[in-house]
Image (tube, helix red, strand yellow):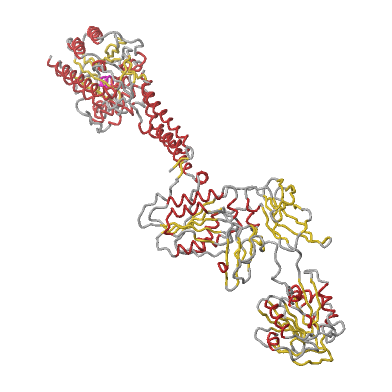
Amino acid sequence: MTSTSAPGAQFLDPAVLARISSLELRARAVVEGFIQGLHRAPNLGASTDFAEHRPYMPGDDVRRVDWRLYARTDRYHVKEFEADTNTNFIVLLDVSRSMAYGDKLQYACTLAACLAYFSSLQRDRVGLATFDQGVVEYVPPSAKHLRLVLYALDHAGASVATAPSEKTSRYRDVFQRLADSVRRRSMVAIISDLYEEPDDIVAAVNYLRGRGNDLMVLHVLDQRELEFPFTEASNFVDLESGDRMPIIPEYLRDDYRALIRDHMATLARRLGGQGVDYAHFDTSLPMDRALFRYLGARRRFERSRKVG
Amino acid sequence: MGLLAPAFLAGLAAISIPVLIHLIHRERRETLAFPSLMFLRKIPYRSVRRQKLRHIALLVLRCAAIAIVAAAFARPFLARRFAAAPIGSDAREVVIVLDRSYSMAHGGRWSRATAAARTIARDARSVDRVSLVAFGSSAAQLTEPTGGAERVERVLLILHPGSEPTRYAAGLRMAAQILGASELPRKEIILISDYHKSGFSPSDEVPLPTGAVVKTVDVARGETEDVAVARVAVARGRAREQVRATVTARLINLGATAQNVAATLELSGRRVETRRVTLPARGSAQAVFSAVNVTSTATPGVVRITPDSQPANDAFFFVTAEESGASALIIEPGQPRANQSLYVSRALSVADDPPVRVDVKSASVITPSDLRGRSLIVVNEADVSPGLAEQLRASVEGGALLLVAPGERARISWPEQWRARLPAVVGAPVDRPDGASWSSADFSNALFEPFRASGGADFSSVTVTRYRTLTPSTDSAQVIARLDNGAPLLVERLINAGRVLLWAASLDPQWTNLPFHPLWVPLMHQLARRSIAGRESPLWFTAPHVLDVGGDPDVIVETPTGERLRGNTAGIGDRHSLDLRDRGFYEVRGGATAIGAGRPIAVNVELAESDLSHFDPAELVAALTARSQRGAEASTRAIIPGTVQEMERRQSIWWYLLLAAALLLAAETMLANRISTPAVERRVVGGGAS
């Protein structure tokens, strides 16, 4: 698991983030904290294509001041370069009822916002699609759609379906439809709890991957879904289907833990085999690891594009 | 360990309630939202019938609280506190000090006391030694320490309350002696009594051995009702040469409610009269019976009332006899002066307390029968023949008072044995024409004791113009009055039970003005009173009392309990003393006297013992231990349960049990709160998700 000891990691603590109501501020806090932690790592874009000058604004890096222009005009101007890429970055966010368990949806939204904000900083085109049984909301990728994306994420909680699902495999339909919508090669981040059989998930992911998209699957789970810490014998209600099942947790705990770990291991193996980056996230842990995953995926994407 | 209310143990069944609650609560399932049952469905279905108790600690606390409450209401007590002691070097010397004063006969006190003593004896271990001491006003050790508990139980079967009052010091002293002689390491005195207030005086000194422990068993139960015959008065009168006596009984009601009782007078065992008397609460009343003729012989009488819870004071015994008084004989010479004995005889005959029968006879005509029964004999200047001297000696030794006035006519030719018995040698007459005054008197002598208040001033006006010189002849002679020149005026000598007084002047106005003096008549009356001192027979005695029954070796005493005492069985020296300890009539008679014809002696109980005042045994223990073990090993006091009722009053275990139950319930509340809090939090989280 990732370490939280890096500088700036305090901005990534879920407990701290939970106190920031604005999703944008939350995303900025995460990303900027993350960037500070990287000590301005050179991974940020290294484009040399000049685009335009713009007036210096407080906060701009003084190294980007065009001193020659200053000598001529006696004013501070900053050089703007062309974006290093025109990459599409699309977040596919699962807003099904199972994501409403605990802080899972909030965590997923924050994660999506962070990735979108980070991408936007690098002048990527940012898009969003929320889905449950079908596509709930779709924001097409654009360099100017960060606000829309954040707005859609802010309202993702209200989008949670009210009716129980009856479908057994929803990813395939949704991803197939989205693959048709996204015509350009994109980076696609799928954020979901992945309560479906690995075969179905892999098949659904393949629709996207088959269009040349670079995929990363962020598997978000609540800690209770992993540990099954319940002690009281209870009637467990499936948030997706509404089914009820009398459960004595202490008798099923070990089997459950083994099954979900096997599920995660299967997904990691199968998706990794398909070239899909898979990562599991516990909502009680910081989300900086997601950003590392994003950067790694983006580098791979750049390389593959140059090669392509 | 025993239980006073074992029925409350049925409350233990209530333990099933928390058990059922814990089981039933286990079955109440909550609804819990979960993201997906996908994995749970994959787990093979198992049907489990699960009746597992949860929160075992909570259940145990609840069951324990119910069990303790049920046990507390069952009122447990420790019935065998002694038996629990380990056997070893802690062998005990136990002295059971049992009060058998007559107040112990009240209600069920005696049965409770013997039951407690029996319990103590039975609970003693084989290494312990137990002895029994019974006491009233005196104490007696009834069993030896080595006699064993069985011996104590046998004695208890035949032991009954006596007629004596309570004197705790007597019983405790004897117990202390027994403990002092014991070599056993633990010494205990167990005092079983009704703790009658009159029997305990804080000034009683009872030196207890070091380490001795005093334990108490109180058998009083707050008895408050009792009616007693407190006293009987017999007023005598004469009617037609017949002596009649009017008996008046004073009855007291010690209880808080008024009582109506029947008082019956019995004389010589025959019922004479019955009167009903109403007694106010805590008050008294008199029962006056009609006058009855009495004979010259002593007649036993009893006043009885309706028997109540205290029988010892429901009858009052007395003896009624013909009026008795002093009997004086004045012996004068064959040819006396005119009015020589007039002043003496007149002064004596007018006395009424006691009345004095006076006879004046010439010395020459005196016979032994004239002297028999005389308490006062006056030899008024009379010649004393050897025969008369011998008769006078016998009378004096029998207790008579002899006053001798030699006067003018006294002869030096008195027989030697007569002169030897006089307190002084009679010398020649001495004239004091100026009149010698009576300067001093020995007011410590009973004869002059009533005149002590005057300080002798009254005698100083008595003048003597002529007197005989008196020289005390023996060391036993005592000059009790002197003239202003120091010459003895009156000399006294004791001879056995009697006494002889020798007067230096005359008993008429010949030599002194005393017969005309205001002191003359009182002095003569005091002389008569003195002559019968100790000889009057009281109507009754109060137990305990030691009575002199004379020196007859053949004397037989019948006690109220039917016991017969003979000769010197109760003798002290050459005279027999009778220890009056039982209420009722004793009969003292000679060996040849028929049964019933002897002298009756009435004995009653001490009325103070009828008082129902009770004191805390702790006072007695505190007084004994504080005095006897000051600075030494501290004595402990413990209350030994005598009966189940006593245990109920004393036991206090159930309070501690209730306290323990309260603490358990408090712990249960805290634990239940701690257990329930996380569940609530979980439900809030789960509810928010769904």
What span is in magenta? A115-121
Task: Give how far across and how far down residue B225 sits, in percent.
Answer: 65, 47
Rendered image quadrant of residue A6: top left
Q: Is residue B206 visible?
A: yes
Left or right of residue B455: residue B6: left
Q: Is residue A120 magenta?
A: yes
| Front one among B617 and A243 | B617
Rendered image quadrant of residue A209: top left
| Front one among B530 and B40 | B530
Task: Give how far across and how far down residue B351 sits, in percent.
Answer: 81, 71
Q: Is residue B319 magenta?
A: no
The quarter of the rendered structure image containing the C terminus of chain B is top left
Outermost residue toward the right in this view: B338
User: How would you classify the magenta stretch by its main secondary structure?
Assistant: helix
The answer to whether A225 is drawn above or below residue B120 in the figure is above
Left or right of residue A62: residue B78: right
